[in-house]
Amino acid sequence: MGEGTYVREQTTKISKNKSIRLPFDVPMMLAVLVLLVFGLLMVYSASWDFSIAMGRESTYLFGRQVLWVFLGLIGATVASFFNYHLYEKILIPMWVGTLLLLFAVLILNDPSGNEVSRMLLSGSIQPSELAKAVIVIYLSFWLYNRIDSINDVQIAYIPLGVILGITFASIMAQPDLSAAITVLILGVMLFFLAGGDWKIILLVVVIALLVGLPLVYLYPTGRERITSYLTSLNNPLESSYHIQRSLEAVVKGGWLGVGIGQADTKFTGLPLAPTDSIFAVIAEETGILGGLFVVGLFVVFVWRGLVIAKNAPDQLGSLLAFGLTAWIAIEAMMNMAVIVGLLPFTGNALPLVSAGGSSMVVTLTAIGIIMNVSRTTKLQKSSERSPHSAVVDLRRRDGRGRVSRHDRS
């Protein structure tokens, strides 16, 4: 009896002094799950009329979205337990395969600039979505392996320009302007974090703007969107039809919204309500407060992604976590900014919310990779930093795992 009492007392002490800690970042996981559930609700609300217009049953798009979320969660789970260092073994096939898919779009489809021309298998696969995630993974390894010569023109600058140039041109030819620009932005950000000279980076950005803006303006789609955006700055009533209907939805929603399922703009001509314009439906049905709720969830996601990147056991993990987090953040920011008229129309999805298979599966798998960086950080006790080295520079130039102060004596 006395021995049993002693065991219970010791068990109680252990349970009080030792809390249960999951090997993943819990705040990020919760933010992602809430976005997924809220996104399914909004897709259900926004898609039934869209599904009927396609000649399908009213729940067709919602059912497909549930399937994509399920497949994406499987991808995220597998990626979260797959050591991120092992991607190096499949790096070249991954990048080459992505380029082949991009070229297949050009060969099999008519590059008319619409959404269908950017997809394969009757709209089931959009290679440009995959390309944005793959370029982050590829460049993270590429830069990590060249940390010591990151500012060498022949070893770093020229090859990096070729890598980004090929990917940019392959996406631009579809054309998918927003995806191509996103790839360039991510490449520049990763190069900076890897220790690239900011003066050279600034020069590259200036050159890209001088060359890229006229190039974008040569495309009919790009010229139309830029002209429409500049016109709307002077008079919102002269903005494009898409933006006018989006702003109408936001105004109708007010602060509290008209109620889930009660919006009417999605039935009266709001383009692409379940996909590109899903944030307009959110604003109308849940109001400005609902929109701010979604923004807040993405802020939590970005915050935790940056924390994971800062605390990663090596710079490869930092580059991967930061790059993938930045990509998802840029996608979200562009989508929401377009709906309220702050950016020209880009045609990209709202991550974790918009209807779409490629975006959902690729985004969730990328989040799984970020979670694996978090998991590796927490499980590798030998890589934990002392309190004196808690602040970590994402641009640390050692390029390899850092040795704790306890081992330096």
Image (spheres, rainbow, N blue to C red):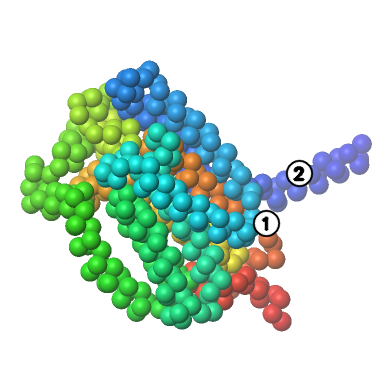
Left or right of residue 369: residue 235: left
Q: Which mark is residue 12?
A: 2
Q: Residue at x 42, y 57 (%)?
A: 326
Q: In front: 22, or 162? A: 162
The reply to whether discs 2 and 1 touch (Cβ–Cβ < 8 Å) is: no
Q: Residue 18 appears at what percent x and percent y?
A: 70, 50
The amino acid beneath tag 2 is Thr
* Quadrant occupied by the C terminus: bottom right
Q: Position of residue 348 (x, y in %)?
A: 33, 45
The residue at 50%/56% (across/down) is 96
Q: Is residue 1 above or below residue 23?
A: above
Q: Residue at x 42, y 53 (%)?
A: 132
Q: Nearer the viewer, mark 2 or mark 1?
A: 1
> Mark 1 packing: few (<14 Cα in 10 Å), some, or many (20+)?
few
Image-quadrant location for residue 271: top left
- Mark 2 nearby-residue class (10 Å; few <14, some 14–19, many ≥20): few
Going 58% across and 39% down the picture, which residue do you hit?
74
| SS type, badge 1 | helix
Residue under circle 1? 379
The foreground one among 241 and 56 is 56
Where residue 89 appears, as percent x and y from the top left, is 62, 59
Label at residue 119:
none
358 up-or-down from 61: above or below: below
N-terminal label among 2 and 1: 2
Q: What percent of the width, then of the height, locates residue 237?
A: 8, 42
Secondary structure of the residue carrying tag 2 is helix
Q: Quadrant of the N terminus?
A: top right
Quick check: 135 above or below 362?
below
Residue closest to the eye, 378 or 158 = 158
Q: Is residue 190 visible?
A: yes
Question: Furthest-top residue in view?
Answer: 57
